[in-house]
Amino acid sequence: MAKKRTKSKSKPTAANKKKVSLKPSKQNKIIFGSLLIVLSIALFFSFMSYYFTWQADQSLLSEFANRNAEAKNLLNKFGASVSHFFMYRGFGLASFAFPVLLAVTGLYLFLGLSGKGLVGKWIWGLLGVIWISVALGFFAIDQPLLGGLIGYEMNDFLQDYTGKIGVFLILVFVLMVILVRLFNFTPEGVANFFKKQRQQITSDFQKTVSVSDETNESEETSLDLSPEDNEPIKVDTYTHKKDIPPLKSEAGLDVNLPEEEEVDISLEVEKVEEEKEESDIKSEKLVKDFGEFDPKLELGNYKFPPLDLLEAHGASGGITINQEELEENKNRIVSTLKNYKIGIAQIKATIGPTVTLYEIVPEAGIRISKIKNLEDDIALSLAALGIRIIAPIPGKGTIGIEVPNKNATIVSMRSVIASNKFQKAEMELPIAFGKTISNETFVVDLAKMPHLLMAGATGQGKSVGLNAVITSLLYKKHPAEVKFVLVDPKKVELTLYNKIERHFLAKLPDSDDAIITDNTKVINTLNSLCIEMDNRYELLKTAMVRNIKEYNVKLKARKLNPNDGHKFLPYIVLVIDEFADLIMTAGKEVETPIARLAQLARAIGIHLIIATQRPSVNVITGIIKANFPARIAFRVTSKIDSRTILDAQGADQLIGRGDMLYTQGNDVTRLQCAFVDTPEVGKITDYIGSQRAYPEAHLLPEYVGEESGTGIDYDIADRDAMFREAAEVIVTAQQGSASLIQRKLKLGYNRAGRIIDQLEAAGIVGPFEGSKARQVLVPDIYSLEQLLENETK
Ligand SMILES: Nc1ncnc2c1ncn2[C@@H]1O[C@H](COP(=O)(O)OP(=O)(O)OP(=O)(O)O)[C@@H](O)[C@H]1O
């Protein structure tokens, strides 16, 4: 009871306090506001009449209590006494600021405006009062009524200490403070003021001129709604209320116009159409006459490949995993973890196409780091290939164990292309990679990646992955919108796309084949792409846009003149298979342009996809890695490789056949890559290839290398051990081809390629001639021997 009472006692006091001091009711505010206004009027009139009656009323001041005594002041004895107090004993003429301040305060309260800034007004007001009274005391020392007693005394006091000049300087300084703080009296402020005045005059002048030229209509538009200081008027489109910036009165007081009044004033806001530049009007007319520019028009009848070119790969039955398998795996996980004394509170399974994710909530008190440390042991105990432990699953407090399904389901390209997610994807370059562990279609935008690095050991699904990427784009993009530059040193993986050369491929002007299989050509192509990139940046600059998307939108709206070199820019996707081979043979020569493209090409629509078998650090160099945030790892053979690609392990524990990890930044997602077989790709390219095409492949800018040859100088000492045998084979057969050396000497493609380069450097074979074999420059074995002997001399 006692407690209650104390509580109830303390509460109301606090509340009352609040009510009285901080939040007066609206009525109270109005009452108090009116009182202040009335008081200010009374003061004003008293002060006014005091100047005429003060002498007459002087003697009455001591007779305030005498009812018979009558003062001359308009407000009688009250007026005479108060005025005497303020004007004579106080601040003199400056006292007129008090009725003003009181009136403003009263208005604030009366209208219920927020009291922000009121204190400031009082402070500045009082400072102004003191300054004026001291100034008047200083200049009109013989007129005590002007400066008042305080003005006089303060002046006297200051003069005693600082002398007349000192007081004058103090007055000037305080005046400066007031001017700077209250009226922004700075050199820039003054300059701006004059500038605005000048602008106002010129615009007024122009308006007058235009009014005389134009019809009545322009009279309406010349109605100037903007306030003088060019601050914008915000108009609420629903209520048509103007949000007018507070006006400043001469005395430096912010006067906020009461909102209610604004509603009463019916303000008609005329929608003034935005001023259009001449070019805008022109482009609008063009769009009106001819419609938007359509880059697809040239191949207007182009038909996108239908879905039935793709096969279902028996995936129509859905995922096949039975309850037994799930139970079995669960029991194994539980018992394995028990061996390590890890209790499980809960376990949940998510079935994916190739793996099932078991999500475990460990018992309270078990450290996740313990499970993480036991990762390898647990994987070993579960004795299955492809187990990956994620401890903890990012964003969840659980631990994931991925266990491969006994019967993996193939994710067909058909199923992902047909998915709603892909069909409705509002992306620039949508790619349907496959399905996630929870069987959702995984679609990403290549334009956002913006480049992709793909790695994986032989036979783990890289080529299929590349085909999936290309197929996705072929299903979604018109030939006018995207072009591929394909680099295929293996010569077999991407050849099928030859059929769509005149639809979708880009090549160097002088080359026969669009698909690049030769390393020297790759260097030229990469450099040519760099030129294309620079050209595109130049176009973007002149069009004043930031990226290819904005550029093409502007071009479609006919805002860019083709006569100035503007043209529709298709996305360019550079696909390099076997990047390791390229880096090994050409090194810096390819690394530099690739790094340049990777760093800069995202805005102008050139995107790189690089695939490699060997994800070692000398292939995926730091500079390349830094510019390829999006990476895909198929199965690799070692943890180190996994780290090189993903900066995380796990790719070594994949099960192959399209099982992959995708990362774009931090999160690693396990996916089953969509499967598209070579015959399917064949069908798609046949379908596209059989349609009307452009006259030729999209031409890249010409690039003239420093040397037309290989550009690689070989020292005699650096020659391959099989160099002599290879030279003999070539000269005997009189056919300069790497594949001949490969066959006869049973060498790998790369080594044979290098030997051919060395033979060229030695002058035994001629330069590269596209798809034709190189010319053999030595007629017979005898001449060859002579040539080689002369070399050693
Ligand atoms: N997503 C997938 N789904 C099912 N099977 C696949 C998938 N990807 C690849 N495979 C199987 O793996 C085989 C090898 O794939 P792929 O040719 O893509 O390997 P690769 O990594 O390109 O090898 P290499 O580096 O030697 O060219 C395919 O023939 C196919 O049988």
Image: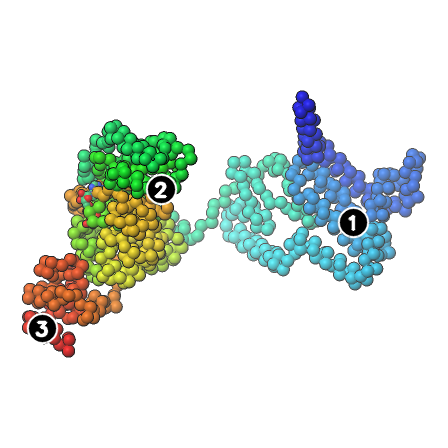
Looking at the rendered structure, the kind of residue marked 3 is Glu
- Judge from the rendering whether residue 314 lies leftward or rightward of residue 729; answer left or right: right
Queried on whether the Cβ of the residue with tag 3 lies below 8 angstroms from ligand 1, the answer reads no
- Judge from the rendering whether residue 379 lies leftward or rightward of residue 765; answer left or right: right
Looking at the rendered structure, the kind of residue marked 2 is Lys
Looking at the rendered structure, the kind of residue marked 1 is Ala
Query: Which of pointers 3 and 1 lies earlier in the amino acid sequence?
Result: 1
Query: Which of pointers 1 and 2 lies earlier in the amino acid sequence?
Result: 1
Q: Which mark is residue 94?
A: 1
Mark 3–mark 2 distance (CA, rounded to whole Å): 65 Å
- Judge from the rendering whether residue 292 lies leftward or rightward of residue 265; answer left or right: left
Classify the position of the C terminus by image quarter. Answer: bottom left
Q: How far across and how far down the image is residue 519, in percent?
A: 21, 60
Q: Nearer the viewer, mark 3 or mark 1?
A: 3
Residue appearing at x 19%, y 36% in the figure: 312
Mark 1–mark 2 distance (CA, rounded to whole Å): 81 Å
Residue identifier under label 2:
372
Residue identifier under label 3:
785
Q: Evaluate if marks 3 and 2 touch, with contact meaning CB atoms under 8 Å apart.
A: no
Spot the residue most to the top. 1
Q: How far across and how far down the image is residue 5, in percent?
A: 69, 24
Closest to the observer, 29 or 461:
461
Query: Which of pointers 3 and 2 lies earlier in the amino acid sequence?
Result: 2
Res. 437 visible in picture: no
Closest to the observer, 611 or 193:
611
Q: How far across and how far down the image is residue 571, in percent?
A: 30, 51
Classify the position of the N terminus by image quarter. Answer: top right
Closest to the observer, 646 or 481:
646
Which type of secondary structure does the marked residue at label 3 adopt?
A: helix
Residue appearing at x 34%, y 57% in the figure: 623
Residue appearing at x 64%, y 58% in the figure: 186
Q: Nearer the viewer, mark 1 or mark 2?
A: 2
